[in-house]
Image: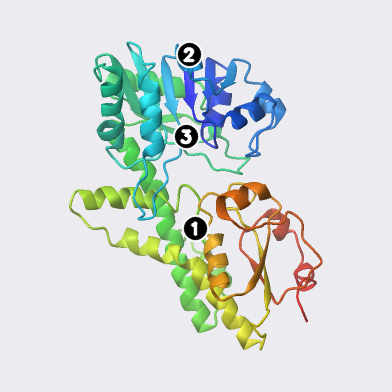
Amino acid sequence: MKIGIMGLGYVGLPLAIEFGKVYETIGFDIDQKRVEELNQGNDSTLEFDANEIKKAEKLIFSSNEDSITDCNIYIVTVPTPINKENEPDLTLLENVSRQIATHLDINDIVIYESTVYPGATEEICVPILENTSGMKFNEDFFCGYSPERVNPGDKEHRITKIEKITSGSTPEIADKIDELYRSIITAGTTKVGSIKVAEAAKVIENTQRDLNIALVNEFSIIFNKLGINTEEVIQAASTKWNFQPYKPGIVGGHCIGVDPYYLTYKSKEIGYKPEVILAGRNLNDNMGIYIADETIKLMRHKSISLDNAELLIMGFTFKENCPDHRNTRVMDIIKRLNELELKVDIHDPWVHAPNVKNDHGVDVSNTLSDKLYDAIIIAVAHDDFRNMEIEDFEKQLNK
């Protein structure tokens, strides 16, 4: 058995390392710089150190497509973002499917982990595999779907400790795929009856979380107008055993802020316009603007002139304690403040500043300066900020 992991980001690298401890594995990525850094034992996502990478003794990193030619199991982990219209962008998924198809051999298995809407694997990917390879689905080659559940920056819930959903295009292939994942996932697996069920399970996991956060965000807006401390309310309500203590905030990243749109896209395609899901998405998408506007209100309330005012935003990543800034909604705060022609500095100790500049067009400092500001927005709950005292923030403020 030889496994080809297609994509070496936050999803692909953990899989490549774990499978590479047991099976001959090729970790493939078209980004040559990414492959070079991994071959040197460096992981820019900060998920693994050199010693952890070395433990995968059967793993080879490569950007040479010829390296995957003799693989018989392919696992696809490329990103599946949304476009400006909040519709699925499956370009990378389609491209990697064509790439794999040119190397397909009899009885090969292609497993998709990238988030998609229910039906996408068989409606989009399988036809590409068939047409490019000239082979017949479920006769010459087979497919499966096992949704990724990686949580970037979480050193406790690593991939082996998260139960895995598995599925296959035939009952026999489903068994093989489940057995494959059980060989590395100590938390166990759950085999479901179809690829569509596995695809749907993934999108509702994050859609449910998105809606719960949207609900608490709406609570916070109401309580703010009532002059009530939202955190205190949540703490009080949490004394009941079945209350779920979600926290308000901006919702970005490559999963929670994206996956609901995959489900709503497919829903509208089959003639049903979802209301609750889209309402939650709309509320969460506008929280950055709300935070910026509330900050301005507080400044005016305290008679702080907006002329030449300078603000500090602490945190830029889409979540705490990781360098991932894909689809960060902190940009919504920045854009709103820029519209008001306010001067904004951004501090985040986790990001690689040149990458942020290249991807988002803004400057970020990894160190906190001695400069004084008229207002500070703590946008991301990095431990670096949680460990600071209130006096530390006050030192950064103009008196």
Identify which amino acid the numbered label 1 is placed on.
Answer: Val
Q: Secondary structure at mark 2?
A: strand
Q: Residue reaching furthest left?
A: 271
Q: Position of residue 74 (x, y in %)?
A: 42, 22
Q: Is residue 109 visible?
A: yes
Q: Position of residue 357 (x, y in %)?
A: 62, 52
Residue pictured at 47% horizontal, 29% vertical: 188
Labels 3 and 2: the sequence-earlier one = 2
Identify which amino acid the numbered label 2 is placed on.
Answer: Lys
Q: Residue 163's mark?
A: 3
Residue pictured at 32% horizontal, 10% vertical: 106
Labels 1 and 3: the sequence-earlier one = 3
Q: Position of residue 241 (x, y in %)?
A: 48, 59
Residue linked to disc 1: 251
Task: Judge whether 23 appears above or below 38 on screen.
Answer: above
Side (left or right) of 275 relative to 161: left
Task: Judge whether 75 appears above or below 136 on screen.
Answer: below
Residue linked to disc 2: 2
Side (left or right) of 300 relative to 99: right
Q: Badge 2: how crowded within 10 Å, few (<14), some, or many (20+)? A: some
